[in-house]
Amino acid sequence: MSGSDLLRLGVLGSGHGSNLAAIGRDIDQGLLSARIAAVLSDQPGARILELGRTIGARTECIVPGLAGGRLDPATEEKFVAILREEKVELVVLAGFMRIIGSTLLAAFPRRIINVHPSLLPKHRGARAAAQALAAGDQVTGCTVHYVDQGVDTGEIIAQQKVEVRPDDTAETLQARIQFAEHALLPSVIATFARR
């Protein structure tokens, strides 16, 4: 497949970038016909930016103008401008700890997906593994869904179950959920690449 045929991805993240690494792994192994064109973060020290540079993607940190979990419109416009400059076709939220709004959603209708560490609609928001343990769940997992203006409320695309073990802590459970995410997210992106 030629470079012009590859699905151009924009990955937004706030942390370590393990899902970005999983996407890159599947691209390198020929399992995913995509190119990571841009890696954007809201956190200056986020490791995801370092990973983005190592794979040759355009990397930018845009610190939101307002405190809190929601992106302000001016910041969203900056994200949109970069994603459009890089001709991004699919935006992937991978550990992006902000709620996006109408500016980004309008720019990429049904082209923004998120990976979340629970079987939505259960355990939306932060600390989903701890929420699953507190609820006494025997099974949890991860979900890839379309992004809307709510918190983890968009249409579900795919899910992967993860067993909750009797000796699990939030950390051990989160680690196994993340392992499942690393398989599920690239496989969902591959379905977009085949369209």
Image: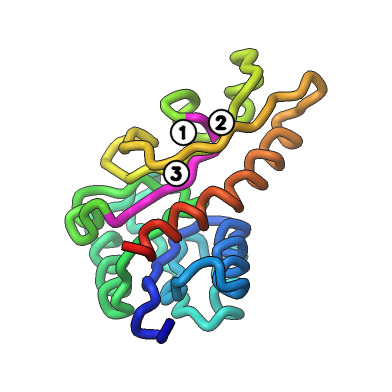
Q: Is residue 45 visible?
A: no
For label 2, the SS is helix
How many other residues sit within 10 Å of disc 1, few (<14), some (14-19) or many (≥20)?
some
Residue visible at 62% across and 68% down in the picture: 25
- Tell me if 73 is positioned left or right of 167 in this view: left
Asked if the residues shown at circle 2 and circle 3 are in contact, with their CB atoms under 8 angstroms apart, the answer is no
Residue visible at 64% across and 39% down in the picture: 177
For mark 2, what is the residue? 128
Residue at the right extreme of this rendering: 167
Q: Quadrant of residue 90?
A: bottom left
- Tell me if 82 is positioned left or right of 59 in this view: left
User: Given the image, on which type of amino acid does mark 3 rest?
Assistant: Val
How many other residues sit within 10 Å of disc 2, few (<14), some (14-19) or many (≥20)?
many
Q: Position of residue 27 (x, y in %)?
A: 55, 71
131 and 143: which is toward the camera: 143
For label 3, the SS is strand
Residue visible at 49% across and 58% down in the picture: 13
User: Given the image, on which type of amino acid does mark 2 rest?
Assistant: Ala
Q: Which mark is residue 125?
A: 1
For mark 3, what is the residue? 144
Q: Position of residue 64 (x, y in %)?
A: 37, 58
Residue 157 on the magenta segment? no
Q: Earlier in the sequence, mark 3 or mark 1?
A: 1
